[in-house]
Amino acid sequence: MIFGADPSQPRPDAPERIVVVGFGPVGARFVDELRPATLAGLAEVTVVGEEEQAAYNRVLVADLGVGRTTLTAMQLADRDELEVDGVRVLLGTRAARIDRSRRRLHLSDGTTVAYDRLVLATGARAAVPNLTGLNPDPLHPVLPPGVTTLRDLADAERLGEAVRGGRHIVVLGGGVLGLEAALAASEEGATVTVVHHGEKPLGQQIDRAGGGTLSAALRRQGLRLAPNARARGIETGDDGAFRALLLDDGSAIDGDLLVIACGARPRRELAEGAGLAVDRGILVDHRLAAVHTEHVFAIGDCAEIRCPDPSCAACAHQPGPSGLIAPGWRQADWLAASIRARLLGDSAPAPLPEERPGVILLKARGVNLAVAGDAQTDPWDTVAWDADQAAGRGPLEVSLWADPAHGRYVKMCTRDGVLEGFIALGMPRAAAELTLLFGSGSELPADRSVILRLDGPESSLGAPGSAAGPESTLCRCAGVSRGTVQEAIVGGCSTVESVSKETRAGTGCGGCKDGVRELIEQHFAAVGA
């Protein structure tokens, strides 16, 4: 069966056929932003998803596993609503091959879909290390019983079974994903050991002193930590299920469930099979078009912006796909806006801005951490000072405050008063303010202690000098301002869920939900008064 006419034949006045491969958060955002063109009959959109479930927020898979959220609250798209609007939704279907010459996408069920524009939003898959006893096919991994990643609903169910059974969970990986899952599982009663390289978790993002403070805070929350550990294999029982993680030093960590949280790898195999240029991800230019080809685009975790121009300064030091949801959503918005401009006559969007380093957020009941930029420099680092002088730039100034006994640590690295990196642990209001200042590129107060006093008993987020005005960004993932959230609350939204549905705030990492909840409480307290 073939969907769509032969692309080689003229199609006067026919709607543009747009096919989207991947129905995760980024693909769903792109399809949603194209609805005006679909409703106008100018676009014929087909979205292909491997899972039987419509798009949901993968960031919250661990929360789903431990029972802190529901699938309904995680959903980002409604299949029935999309189909009413004219979007063809193919679930449980894998894209098998791209025929670029005929502009057809071949599907796993033997059908094909013709396209005028093909948008790849294939995302990323969990990186599974090559360990003795664990060597699955990297493209279609099948893990042994008792071993899971944290990418889909089946993974959430495996984690949930272990938590409900009070079993021992071993988490391999000291990044944000692994730590959040470990904390959530521990808080719900499971015994959890986190195994990671290096002396501290988040080793590439946090400095030594901050890492030591974080490790102590994690232990106070009940986690067992195994630092400076390198896994070499797994041990299984007679039933083939996981029993222990084997380390290079000959020791073993027993457990009932191994959660692999070793990062993710862009899913580029479909593009690679079609002869598209790839590196870490699918190479695209600043219009998100696949380089050296036509009619094909890529967005989200699978896309790597690196244009063919060797003199392009923006592409000279591109780190590759970020793995964060916010940049993918911004790309989806921009590409959809550019298509709407051509089809509907909307204003063309400004050029896609260069992504700034993202803010890494770790939020748990007993741990609140925000890290961004380069915060590795020490206050008395004369080598860094000399390097700045040699480069003809102002020195990097470091302000640091530590209270390790209470799990608090703040570090601000500024140049000419503007943040280049920061760490805020155990100081949620300082973290929120620094996140705003970092995102806007605004100068810090000359008296840095103002930031620290935000978490004092006399502080208020609306204090003079605070960056948290109505125009400031509350939800970094979805790009929603505080003012937009406040308008939704005034308009009748009285729960975090209703605000999220109205504004999209809180539909990403969930780190802004406390801020949304605080605005709701402030509004209704004032109304009640």
Image: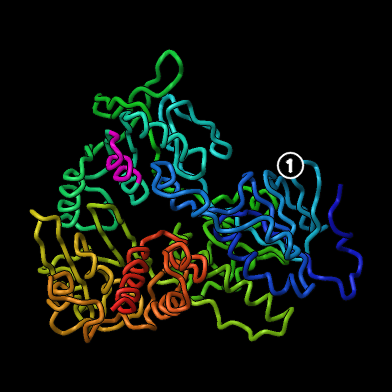
Q: Which residues are magenta?
A: 181-190
- Whether 66 is drawn above or below 304: the answer is above
Q: Quadrant of the C terminus?
A: bottom left
**Residue to which mark 1 is pinned:** 108
Quadrant in which residue 458 is drawn? bottom left
Q: Main structural element of the magenta stretch: helix, strand or loop?
A: helix
Residue at left offset 38%, top offset 73%: 474
- Whether 293 is drawn above or below 126: the answer is below
- Whether 270 is drawn above or below 463: the answer is above
> Is residue 449 something one can see in this rendering?
yes
The x, y position of residue 226, in whole percent, is: 23, 37
Residue at left offset 56%, top offset 61%: 26
Mark 1, Cα crowd under 10 Å, few <14 / some 14-19 / many 20+, is some
Quadrant in which residue 82 is drawn? bottom right
The x, y position of residue 492, in whole percent, is: 47, 74
Residue at left offset 53%, top offset 38%: 138
